[in-house]
Image (cartoon, rainbow, N blue to C red):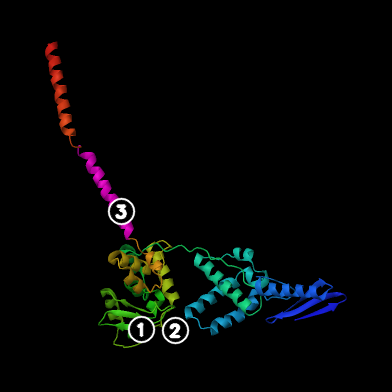
Amino acid sequence: MSLYRIGNVWHYSFYWGDRRFRGSTKQMQRTKAERVQAEAMAKVREQPNVRLTGRTPLLRELAPRFLAWVGAADLEPKTKAYYRNGWRLLSQTRIASIRLSDIGEEQITALHFSGSVANVNNARRTLRRMLGKAHTWGLSGIAPKIRLQKEKRRTLLINSERETQLLSFARQPLRDVLVIMQDTGLRPDEVLKLRWEHLDWLQETASNPSGKTERARRVVPISERVLTILGQRWTGQNQGWVFPSPTKYSRTGHFSLSTVEHQFVDARRKAGLPEALVLYCARHTYATDALARTGNMAAVMDAMGHSNVQTTMIYQHQGLEQIRNAINLRNKENQTSAIKPSPGTEESFGQNLGQSLESDAVVVAVND
């Protein structure tokens, strides 16, 4: 940090991280120049997107360092893949060629991606992390606030009819994966990562030892038809993948999630089912049915691996069934009461009819 004079005017020069900032204070008195320099340094440290005379890198110039950090950081493999995919999405947009100091709300709002809202949020979360790391590394000011778009909750269920339709067109391993998801609530990648040593045949359970949270590492019960599927796949091995990859040089050793998802899209198309129905709906179906039939929130929360009860409560639809039954009962009661005369009505109606007939008879007699 230093002040120097050019003619009668003081100029400042200081470094923040590996960047140099310099410029004129437009002051002729040193004390005033020092105040201007302090204000400039405060802007660099505290305010977002400050651009003095230093040159901030383009977003694409930051990417190699960010991806290297992702690879070396203590992050879950899914999180690393998430950030890599986020950068892939960002790299195809104009924002990749914008300097970090020029990225603001206007540039972020202008981002558009094909596909679901999840894609948009994937890119925005990645951008938020990249700008945050850039600030930590001293390459830019504080990152602007990046708001995520609201993702719609999955509401479609794979009921028995849809399951039958999908299975009629499903190839392996999708056929088995879909049934296991429907009956255990495991995520698709958790099913593909099942190993024989994770199964307890006597207790009829399967353990999921990996996950982003402690709750995700859990034990789930196995249904009879899942036991049948596993029995058909078992050839006497005590360890190894339940869904081993047919590819000799597979990176993971088991079937990839993309393979199963492509098979699902193909089966869904052939079955003529809506595009909103995705593979993950099988997990949603499991939670909805389990909660509706047991009413045991804690047990379903454990089986799903949720760390927050609010997440489990979105599958609580028992109230809808109760309301439906109440309205149906009301309609039946209204229908019955409309047919059956109210008490006293029948007697009154008979008396009036009798009087009417009697009056008619008198009239006729007189006329004759």
Residue 160 position, x and y percent, is 30, 64
Q: Which disc, if any, is residue 252?
A: 2
The kind of secondary structure element at disc 1 is loop
Residue indicated by mark 3? 324
Callout 3 touching callout 1 (CB < 8 Å): no
Instruction: Name the amino acid type tagged 3.
Output: Arg
The kind of secondary structure element at disc 2 is loop
Q: CA distance from mark 2 to mark 3?
A: 48 Å
- Is residue 197 positioned above or below 130 on the image? below
Q: Residue at x 33, y 63 (%)?
A: 159
Residue at the far right: name it: 7
Is residue 333 rendered to the left or right of residue 254? left
Report the predominant secondary structure element of the magenta stretch: helix
Q: Which disc, if any, is residue 162?
A: none
Residue indicated by mark 1? 195
Of tags 1 and 2, which is closer to the observer?
Answer: 1
Q: Residues within 10 Å of mark 1 (few under 14, many from 20)?
A: some
Q: CA distance from mark 3 to mark 1?
A: 43 Å
- Is residue 123 positioned above or below 64 on the image? above
Q: Which badge, 2 or 3, comes first in the chain's sequence?
A: 2
Q: Total marks drawn?
A: 3
Res. 50 image quadrant: bottom right
The stretch of residues the image draws in magenta is 318-341
Query: 248 or 58, which is in the foreground?
Result: 58
Residue at the far front: name it: 31
Is any part of residue 214 visible from this angle?
yes
Q: Quadrant of the N terminus?
A: bottom right
The kind of secondary structure element at disc 3 is helix
Q: Which badge, 3 or 1, comes first in the chain's sequence?
A: 1
Residue 55 position, x and y percent, is 72, 76
